Image (cartoon, rainbow, N blue to C red):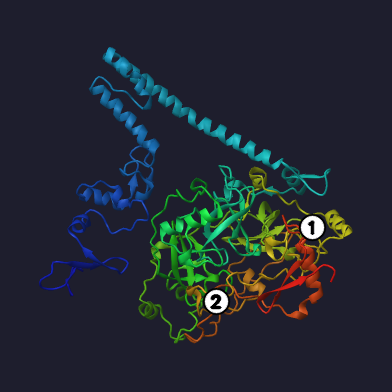
Amino acid sequence: MDWKKDGVGTLGSGSELKFRVNEFGVLEVITDEMEEERGKKAHATTTWSVPTAQEALSEGPVTKEETAWAQRGLVCVRCNRKGSVVDFLSNGLHCSERCLQQEQQEELKREGSRTNGEVLGKKRSRLTERLAEDMDSSMEIAEEDDEDYEEKESRRPARGATRGRRKRRGDAALLRYTVPYGGKKKAWCWASYLEQERAVAAPSKLFKEYQSFPQCKNGFRVGMRLEGIDSEHPSMYCVLTITEVLGHRIRLHFDKYSDCYDFWVNSNSPDIHPVGWCEKTGHKLHPPKGMKDEEFSWSSYIKLNKIQTAPKALFQNQNMTVTPSGFRVGMKLEAIDKKNPSFICVATIADMVDSRFLVHFDNWDESYDYWCDATSPYIHPVGWCQENGRTLTTPPGYPDVKNFSWEKYLAETNSLPAPARAFKVKPPHSFQLNMKLEVVDKRNPALIRVATVVHTDDHRLRIHFDGWTDEYDYWIDADSPDIHPAGWCAKTGHPLQPPITPQDMFETSEQGGCPTPGCKGVGHIKGARYSGHHSAVGCPYSDINLNKDSVLPDRLSGEMPGSGVGRPRRAEPSAEISADANDKPVTSAPSHPEKPSTASAAMETPPKKPVGTETKRRVGRPCKVRKVEELPQEEEVESEVSSVTETKGRSTPPSLCVHIIIACHLVDVRIEPGN
């Protein structure tokens, strides 16, 4: 191929085909239409039906004046507001529909003075008959309507203030909503609690739209089927069933798998999609357990099982406006491992949906993957570690770790770096110490508790559950979907767990329930399969379970999707390292004076794994092997027997099937009555 100085390549004699390399390094054929468009607009990539800024401009020839105007930025001809092309309407002259309408009103008024008047604004339809009868009076009518329009405009701020006051009164009413607890005669409400503690609730304006009060009802119902992302394997889309609905939250179940692996999401979660979404977008859908990919189809599955699918209208992520992004699947970047925050690793964009993309760590299994957008503080462009004096963790098995360079690695993997311009800076959150809010309890995800902000950094909060000891505190992202403003539970109809009191602890111990102080026996360390527990073995808050990630084997244990073959896992770091990912100092609340350590742990490269030596490694989180000495087997059996009887909607069977985790396998121990 012969290349010219202008970057155009030809195949030589006898061929009129022309080629060029686009901004992503991809070879593309140049057509006559592309040559004509090249003078009118720059290369741009759109996502779905979102137009580029260049397409928003007129299709006429670009003049020097227009070029200079585009480079300086746009100024609204109505209100003189400045902004970029993406902030303006397609004509490039107005920043909003309101300015455009006002400009059209004045234009019609000027036009009417030259032509004996025309009808102004949206109300002019009622004047057309009168204009036919008396054209001379049209200007007077136009002027009167214009005065009405201006008077209406002057009243709008007052209406806005009225709506603001109404909203504040509504929020205050939510804080007065009472929550029964500890008996019929006891009640709790946010308003009294804030006054008693002399505390302040985090304002709703600090929360993202998906964290704040929802604008519509939750229409999902138990039994509906949908497609969604596995929270433990974020690269996988699975067949899911709604098994429980609480307010604006739904519990999802993997079809044909144990209830232990159920998980909770909000009804507006971007991780769930209607039936058929995977086929429409080209994503692989993992069928229910026991079914092969080629055997599964939604039509036959629905017909065979007589199931109901969730209507598309219930999914709030189906009509989202997608912002064009410079990220593309296959691009490389540097990313922080959320599970091991001391590691900054070589990573790849593995998938893209709307404005979000999936970060995958090269040569590690998919359980470390996570979804984010361009504003995430956990991702950086290629070369960021070198510029900032940080250690970059290379992929395991890389042959020349000491001499690793991005230029060489990109050439070896035939990949491109994500452009630095694609990364956006997220402003720090505005949460302050001692603010109160409602937070999903990660150890017992069916519960939402009253919580307090006790530490902060730029993009995270350390939350403390009111009434509990500090050992249950943990860090959470400020943009997490699991935090909500005070009153969210009352607004959505979700139960709220009030702060525990010393009296609650005394009553719990007197009743002979769970021995863990503050725990009322709700939930289980083994997930949603058990509704409650009576001993420390099954308690999510007991000392033996407090720092456990999971006691369950991986859901995919024994199954081997090809994407995870032969990929190693990192050694789990200490809790102290996990708690403090950033090297920036944090602020402490007076009531909790201890400060997390800001010393960064030594970031050593994980041990190398010879490529190809492991050909049958499974994907995902490994089984948690528990030593027999940790707990007497009799105590484990006794705990599980009591827990089985608490399972919701289950009658006591003739024989009890007890599950014990031994050597990464579920072993069934059958206890016959009378034995």
Residue at mark 1: 520
Q: Which dot marks residue 618?
A: 2
**Image-based side of 288 in relation to 634, left or right:** left
Q: Answer yes or no: is residue 270 visible.
A: no
In which quadrant will I find the C terminus? Answer: bottom right
Q: At which x and y percent is residue 338?
A: 56, 68
Q: Amino acid at mark 2?
A: Arg
Name the quadrant containing residue 443: bottom right
Q: State left or right for residue 431 relative to residue 396.
A: right
Q: Position of residue 292 (x, y in %)?
A: 50, 68
Residue 409: percent from the left, percent from the top?
Answer: 39, 79
- Residue 382 picture quarter: bottom left
Q: Amino acid at mark 1?
A: Lys
Judge by depth and name the residue closer to the eye, 443 or 483.
443
- Rounded to the nearest angstrom, the CA distance separating label 1 from label 2 is 38 Å
Say few, some or many: other residues with alpha carbon within 10 Å of mark 1 (under 14 / 14 to 19 / 20 or more): many
User: On residue 590, which mark appears?
Assistant: none
The residue located at (46%, 50%) in the rendering is 318
Nearest to N terminus: mark 1 or mark 2: 1
In the figure, is residue 283 to the left or right of 607? left
Residue 252 in view of the camera: yes
Quarter of the image with the N terminus in it? bottom left
The residue at 28%/12% (across/down) is 133
Number of numbered discs present? 2
Specify the farthest residue to the right: 510
Element at badge 2?
loop
Question: Residues at badges 1 and 2 in contact (C-beta under 8 Å)?
Answer: no
Helix, strand or loop status at disc 1 = loop
- Give whichever of 315, 559 is nearer the camera: 559
Residue 670 in percent (x, y) is at 75, 71
Q: Is residue 205 left or right of residue 133?
A: right
Whether residue 611 is situated above or below residue 657 in the rendered picture: below
